[in-house]
Image: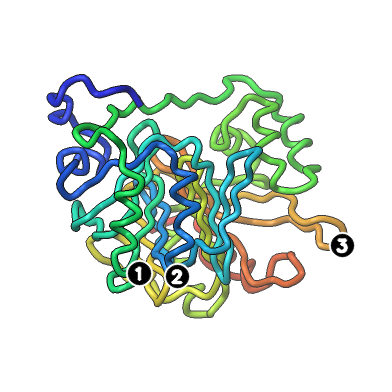
Amino acid sequence: MNALTSLSVYRTPWPAPLGACAAALGDRILRLQDDAPALLKMLYRFPQLNIATRNDAVRLHQGASYAPLALCGDTGVAALRGPGFAWQASPRRWALSLAVLAPLAGIPARTFLFFDRCGRLLHEVQVPEGTAGMAFEELACNRLHPDQHQVPVPDPLPLHSSAACVDLAALEQDWSVLADYRDFTALLQRYGISRLGAYCRVRDKFARAVRLDSVPALLALAAARRTPVRLQVFSGGCEQRYEGVLPLPVWGAEGLCLRQPGLDFRLQPRQIASVWRVRMPAGRGSSRHIATRIELFDHRDERVLMLSCAGSSSGSELPSWRALLGDCLMPPDAPG
């Protein structure tokens, strides 16, 4: 992000909730040092935290602990893992860290916020009220940035492009022989095409658009049948995952919500531009199989959420997951 030169910038629309935070800086909001990895290392002192990864369309909020934080010095990737929970990110890429002292813009007090260079809120860590005494305030004061009058002006959001011409036969051939789904990103880079660009071009056996209505139907039926599901939320290099049986979804002002102790998931359908059923190889050796997952993209063609099978000890997909897909997925031209 660029240095702020004039407070008049605050009058222009900023990504929410950064604008509200900038206006309350030095009062309810404190700017922290530009070293997110160092701050993350210090969160082990809190026995329980509320951790959330979010984008404009989805927010996944879970109770967890930072005690098992792994931070790779070579890559800068931070990772957490626990029962039904996983999180990883590249905090070196984060541009701004803030501490919320009093509730603001729907964000509770005692929350650390992490933003990218474009001013998008990627990750939240909230210390529940009544825990750790004044440890939150002490940590925030220990990590104070010397400038408590301004925050950097966000960079413009990057433009996305996909290859105008690609050898589809070769792409599909390489896709079908992938050693594992984790090699798919490298495949896209090799062909110079975006994830969504590839999905739009390949045949239906690889990727097919489905109706947005398929997603709430799948979540509701999975909860009713108690079929375990994996929810993965993506946000600017952050990825947070929940695995397990889902509660029944409810609809409210915030869209579709899944709530149970330790889990608060919110999806705003109006922020979703397309939904895709994607198939690709997964697993290795005797557990190798074709995995099917559902991926949601926002209006900037960025992947924001993925739904896939969970709960299999062998690594292969459960028949209950495939039955869910068969009962819920609707093509875009299906009658309403």
Query: Which residue is labeled 1 in the image?
Result: 132
Query: Which residue is labeled 3 in the image?
Result: 286
Say which element carries label 2. loop
Q: Residue furthest right?
A: 285
Circle nearer the N terminus (2, 1): 2
Q: Residues within 10 Å of mark 1 (few under 14, many from 20)?
A: few
- Res. 47 mark: 2
Three-letter code, disc 1: Ala
Residue 307: x and y in percent read: 54, 58
Q: Residue at x 42, y 53 (%)?
A: 53
Q: Residue furthest bottom?
A: 225
Tell me the CA gap for discs 3 and 2. Answer: 40 Å
Vertical comparison of 259 with 15: above or below: below
Residue 113: x and y in percent read: 34, 48
Three-letter code, disc 3: Ser
Circles 2 and 1: CB distance less than 8 Å? yes
Colouring scheme applied when the structure was drawn = rainbow
Q: Quadrant of residue 186?
A: top right
Q: Residues within 10 Å of mark 2 (few under 14, many from 20)?
A: few
Q: Quadrant of the N terminus?
A: top left
Q: Quadrant of residue 264?
A: bottom left
Residue 275 appears in view: no
